[in-house]
Image (tube, rainbow, N blue to C red):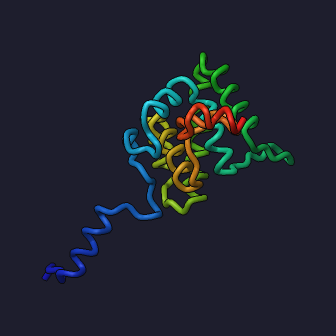
Amino acid sequence: IGVMEHSNKDEVLEKLITPSDVQYPSGLIGCCNVKDCGPQCCLTVCFCHPCAYAMAMTDATLEYNCGKTKLSGYPAYLGAQAFLYITSTCCVGSVLAIGFYGYNHFVLASKYGIAETALMTFFKALCCLPCMVIQDMNLVLTKESTTWSIAPGMSCTPSIKSPLEQLITR
């Protein structure tokens, strides 16, 4: 009783060790496992976080419904974050930030087929919001096959072209 067959045991171990397509590409505290991570992504997250997050959400094509109006795209995401930063000096801003990023996290999980409860999303947003935001950005970068950028057409990763090739293509 309770003895697994050898092949079944290997399948279970494989599922535990190997991430599948229905999981996040990096863990919650997996900042070093983020796609294209290096000095550029660290600097981007530290100094240009709202812009990089807005670009990731633009790549994911999320939409917000405000009554009969649908908001989407880089200006909408950047504007929402600007509102959060302006109101962050009071407790209301912190609650709104948890709601905004938590909502986006939940919508992204649903969009990419990741099973996550609203309660789990709430606790992630409450306990480790910056890690959750990076996890979301990495999810979009991986699923949409994009790289770090801070605005449309402005990548954060260095160009492979030489300076002379860059001048010629301008």
Q: Which residue is drawn at 54% across and 23% down?
A: 47
* Residue pictured at 38% horizontal, 45% vertical: 33
Specify the quadrant that holds the C terminus.
top right
161 up-or-down from 63: above or below = above
Q: Quadrant of residue 111?
A: bottom right
In the image, residue 145 lies at what x, y percent? Answer: 57, 54
Q: Which residue is drawn at 15% across and 79% down?
A: 2
- Extreme residue in the top direction: 89
Number of callouts in the render? Answer: 0
Tell me where residue 83 sits by quadrant: top right
Relative height, residue 23 to residue 101 (above, below): below
Going by the image, does 33 lie left or right of 132? Answer: left
Question: Can residue 55 be seen?
Answer: yes
At 69% from the left edge and 49% from the top edge, which residue is drawn? 62
| Position of residue 56 measured from the top left corner of the image (x, y, whole percent) | 61, 43
Q: Which of 95 and 159 is in front in this view?
A: 159
* Relative height, residue 39 to residue 19 (above, below): above
Nearest the viewer among 62 and 4 is 62
User: In the displayed structure, does residue 22 sit left or right of residue 153?
Assistant: left
Q: From this viewpoint, is residue 95 visible?
A: no
Estimate the x, y position of residue 64 in percent, counting from the top left: 74, 45
Quadrant in the picture for the N terminus: bottom left
From the viewer's perspective, tell me whether residue 90 is left or right of residue 19.
right
The correct choice, above or below, for 85 with respect to 66 in the image is: above
Percent x, y of residue 160: 53, 40
